[in-house]
Image (spheres, grey):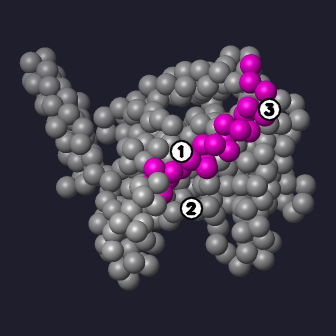
Amino acid sequence: MDILQKEKKLQKLEEELTRLDDEKAIENIQRTIRDYKVQSMSSLSAWDRVLLARHAKRPTVFDFIHHVFDDFIELHGDRLYGDDKALIAGIATLEGVPITVIGHRKGKTTEDNIEVNFAMAHPEGYRKAIRMMKQAEKFNRPIVTLIDTPGAYPGIGAEARGQGEAIARNLYEMSDLGVPIIAIVIGEGGSGGALAIGMGNKVYMLENSIYSILSPEGYASILWKDAKRSQEAAEVMKLTSYDLEELEIIDGIIQEPLGGIHHDPNMVYETMRIVLLRDIRSYENKNQYDIKTERYSKYRNIGFFQRFNYDNLKGVVK
C-alpha cells in the first residue's frame, strides 16, 4: 500500500469523524486517526516520497514566497528572447534583508500546469535566472533558489535556442558569484533543470522532496526498458533527502509533518524562515573571496571519500 492509498483510508476516517456527534465516539476516532498516522506514515519508502514530492496538494513556489518572505516583487524576461513562466524570479525581503528569490513554478490545476509548462523551463528561463543572480551580486543581495521541476524542457524549440548552453552557463556563472546562494529542493529536483539554479553554498531538501539525475520512470526505461519498474528504480536511485544527506550531497533536511507538508504547511514555512535567517546572517561578515571559496570547496569535495577509498584499492584488488 503506497502513501496515496494510505491517505484515502485516512480521509475516510476523517469523513466518519465529521458525521459523529457523540463526544466519546469522536475521541475514539481521533485516537484512531493519530495512531494510524504514526503507524502508516512514519516509515515511508523512496516511492512514497516520490509520490509526496509530486502530490497535487503540495505547496508551490508561490506558497513558499508568500508565507516565508515578507514581500516579493516579480521581475520578468531574460533580455534576449522572452519571459519563461516556468521559472519565477524577483526581489523579496526577510526580516528587512533584501534577497533575490528564484524558483520553478508549478501550477495547482491542469490548466495552470499547461501555462507554466509543468515547471520545465526553456533556455530563456535559465537566462532570466542568471540575469537576476548577476543583479543580486551587483547589489550584494543573498540568493535563495526554490527547486521544483521534473527537468529542463527537452523540446525542439528549447534545444534550438540553446538549452544545454543555458544550463552550462548558469553553472559556470554561479560557481563564481560573490554572494551566498541558498538552494532548497521543495518538491522534485530533476536533472540539469534543477542543478541549473541549485549550485548553492548551502543546499537543503524538504523531507519528502527528491533530487536525482532523472525521474524513476526514465531510469527504469533506460536501465530495464520497462517504465513500470519505477518503484523499484526509486529504491536504488538514492534520490530521497535522507540518501543525499548520508552521501553529503546536501547540507540538511527540513522536516515535514507526518504524511507530508500539505498536512501542516505552516510548520515547514516557519522552519524555512529560521534556516534562511540563520544562514544569511552567517554570511554577513564574509567577503566575496570566502563565499566563492566555500562554494568551490563544497563541490570539489563531493565524492572525495569514495574516490579516496577507490584509489587506495588500486594495485591491491586484482
Q: Distance between the residues labelled 3 and 1?
A: 25 Å
Q: Where is residue 10 in the image (x, y as percent from the top left)?
A: 22, 41
**What residue would you read off at disc 3?**
288
Say which of 137 and 309 sits in front: 309
Q: What element carries label 1?
A: strand
Q: Is mark 3 on a helix, strand or loop?
A: helix
Tell me which amino acid carries mark 1: Val
Q: How far apart are marks 1 and 2 (CA)?
A: 12 Å
Label whose residue precedes the other's in the sequence (1 or 2): 1
**What residue would you read off at disc 2?**
191
Q: Is mark 2 on a helix, strand or loop?
A: helix
Tell me which amino acid carries mark 2: Ser
3 or 1: mark nearer the eye: 3
2 or 3: mark nearer the eye: 3
Q: Viewed as shown, does residue 180 lie left or right of 241?
A: right
Q: Looking at the image, which residue is at 78% across and 34% down? A: 289
Q: Where is residue 169 in the image (x, y as percent from the top left)?
A: 78, 59
Look at the image and say whether residue 293 sits in the magenta stretch.
yes
Q: Viewed as shown, does residue 7 lie left or right of 253?
A: left
Where's the N terminus, which quadrant? bottom left
Report the disc number at residue 93.
none
Look at the image and say whether residue 305 sits in the magenta stretch.
yes
Q: Which residue lies furthest to the front in this view?
A: 315
Dot 1 surroundings within 10 Å: few (below 14), some, or many (20 or more)? many
Q: Looking at the image, which residue is at 68% across and 16% down? A: 95
Say which of 133 and 309 sits in front: 309
Q: Viewed as shown, does residue 252 lie left or right of 61?
A: left
**What residue would you read off at disc 1?**
185
Say which of 4 and 216 sits in front: 216
Label whose residue precedes the other's in the sequence (2 or 3): 2
Query: Bounds of the magenta span?
Result: 285-307
